[in-house]
Image (cartoon, rainbow, N blue to C red):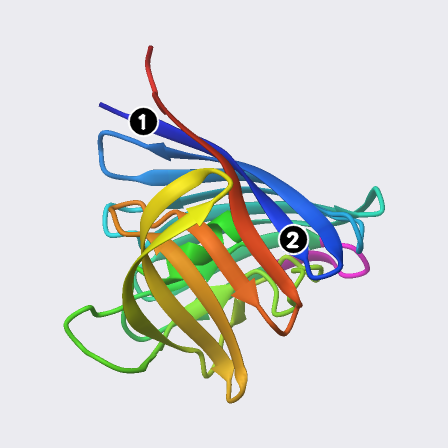
Amino acid sequence: MSTIHTGRIDYQGDTGLRGRESFSITCADDGTRTLQAHCRMFDSRVERWVVHTVDPRMRPLRSFVSQRIAGEFLGEGWFTFAPGQLTGRSVVRGQGEVHQEVDIEGELDYFVPHAVAGDSWITPCHDRSVEGWQDVRNGFTSSLLPDGSTGPMIEQHRGLRQILLGEETVRVPAGEFRTEHFVVSARPGVEEHLWVTADDISMLVKLRSDRLATTYVLAEHRVDDAWQ
């Protein structure tokens, strides 16, 4: 039966709470999963709404991103993904309408729409049968800035790699979870640690970024049947 995971992620900066995100993940009977998120960054005043759907193998199908900064419209985009091609249609402040078609060789590994709850969905492309660091060939995002405050447009994560350190049990305010511990690096010396549920939805439990001096933690979590 279809289920819905609902929760909240707190953006815990080293000097105080930086933001908050409410989200839901709907696991449908056809194997697709849809993330819906509302993100608020208190320090930068960026606010974002995301709807992002992946297939049964956790590869992106389509994504919608809308964002404001200090209450003013920043940009909005609708992205679809077909074999070998990414298509984007955006309206961006200062640029007007933007239409993109990006061709790629091979499979799309992930698309990050800048909901923190979706950051964990870069990990399903990792080959668990291979040890050590793995390069990500076709990883894309709606913005290359850490707070996602450009675009939204199709941008490629170049040079990104990740490693699986193993399974760990992690306790956060939402409870105790069995996780896989990944390290993701965009360039030498810049690493982020992700703890992701060791199951078929790869839900984010904890993310630590020294570069941003912030720990993102799952503060609330509930699972319900989609149809009561």
Q: Is residue 43 above or below residue 208?
A: above
Left or right of residue 60, residue 36 in this image = right
Q: Is residue 58 visible?
A: yes
Which label lies toward us, 1 or 2? 2
Name the amino acid type tagged 1.
Thr
In whole angstroms, how far apart are the C-alphas of marks 1 and 2?
28 Å
Q: Relative to residue 148, is residue 162 drawn left or right?
A: left
Q: Position of residue 223 (x, y in %)?
A: 37, 27
- Spot occupied by residue 49 in the image (x, y as percentages of width and height): 62, 41
Q: Which residue is tagged 2?
A: 12
Residue that appears at 31% across and 82% down: 133
Tell me the SS state at disc 1. strand
Image quadrant in which you'd find residue 135: bottom left
Which segment did they paint magenta? Answer: 92-98
Does 35 sit above or below residue 133? above
Tell me the quadrant of the picture where the N terminus can be found. Answer: top left
Residue at 67% across, 60% down: 147
Q: Closest to the observer: 144 or 42?
A: 42
- What residue is pinned by disc 1? 3
Amino acid type, mark 2: Gln
Q: Does the rendering let one see residue 115?
A: no
